Amino acid sequence: MAIIEAKGLKGIMEFKQDWNEEAILQFYATCFFAKDKERTVHWMTGGERLACTFERFAELLGLDGADGYSTHSHAANGLALQPKALAPLYPRGHASKAVGTSTAMIPKYAFLFKGLTWTLVPKSGDYISVRNFAIDLMLEMANLDRKLNVVDFIFHEMRLASYSQGRSLPYGPFIQAMIEDAFEPSIQKDCSHKVWTPRFDNKKKAPVVAPPSMPVVSPPSRFEKLMTKAQRSIFNMCKFNAQEVVNHNKLAYDRVKMYKDRLCALGDTQVSDDEAPPALALPVLPEFTFPEAGYMDYFVETPARADDKDADASDE
């Protein structure tokens, strides 16, 4: 809060003004910032040409536009500083890649940048990166010896926003105050101005309790692996046998049912549910008789008799 009061930011952060989206769109589409002594801005609202001077704009915001340091006027060649210029806003030993983001800043500057994104450097989407003249603004926050010309900063940023083709409508509340001062008919506001309210959490946070460490499990030994495989094999064997028993019982039930259905289809007999099925008829083989005696002698070669030898010799 000391930085906010020293730099003259308290009044602009307390400013509240609802606005009309169509009126702001028309302002950015038709505005022209003249380079005259009064620094007049011209625009159109509802087909009427309007104008407002820099001094009048400061009065509408309740600020002094002639007092304070102007970051844009002192910029070299009208260009913003590079992100590396923000190094003094980071703690010692920070990573160079973190320069240009608000999360790695010293806490008070990170907290202040969050409030500035609601007022002087409104942003949509990326609320972490510090870009363009927000770099000059944040670097000026570190110098408490001089005030910041808040009106001059807003006036320059509105002019730069009119050149861009972004979809956002920055500084809508401030522009709406300027339009209503120059345009007599009342304009219905369809956008609510949300004012940034800093939150100071003085409650002590509960200490973070580390989760209980898990016991270290050693890898299974060779014997344990062997037993695991054996148990798995026994389980699979039992599972297979149980499935075979189920299949066998189902097949027996289907056969019983088939026979009973056939008997019922004949209509000759009454078949009850607990009646046993008929025995299966075995196939009838043709009758074949073996010789009662001399069976083995038939296959055994007998020695030739003498009479047979003499008969063969006489033939010769």
Image (tube, rainbow, N blue to C red):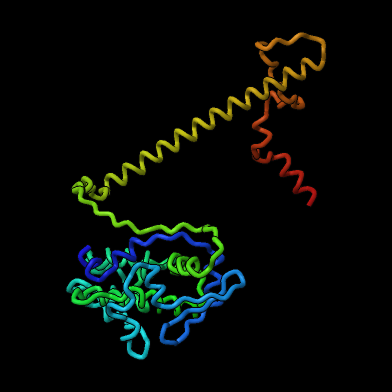
Q: Is residue 277 above or below residue 125?
A: above
Q: Quadrant of residue 149?
A: bottom left
Image position, residue 306 (x, y; %): 69, 40
Inspect this view and state whether residue 133 appears: yes
Left or right: residue 271 versus residue 142 is right
Residue at (76, 44) in percent of width and height: 311
In this view, the residue farthest toward the front is 184
Residues 112 and 221: in front is 112
Left or right: residue 221 versus residue 239 is left
Residue at (35, 71) in percent of width and height: 129
In this view, the residue farthest toward the bottom is 77
Q: Quadrant of residue 91?
A: bottom left
Residue at (28, 54) in percent of width and height: 199
Image position, residue 42 (x, y; %): 51, 78
Image position, residue 157 (x, y; %): 41, 76
Numbered marks: total: 0
Residues 164 and 217: in front is 164
Residues 115 and 151: in front is 151
Left or right: residue 250 versus residue 164 is right
Image position, residue 97 (x, y; %): 29, 75
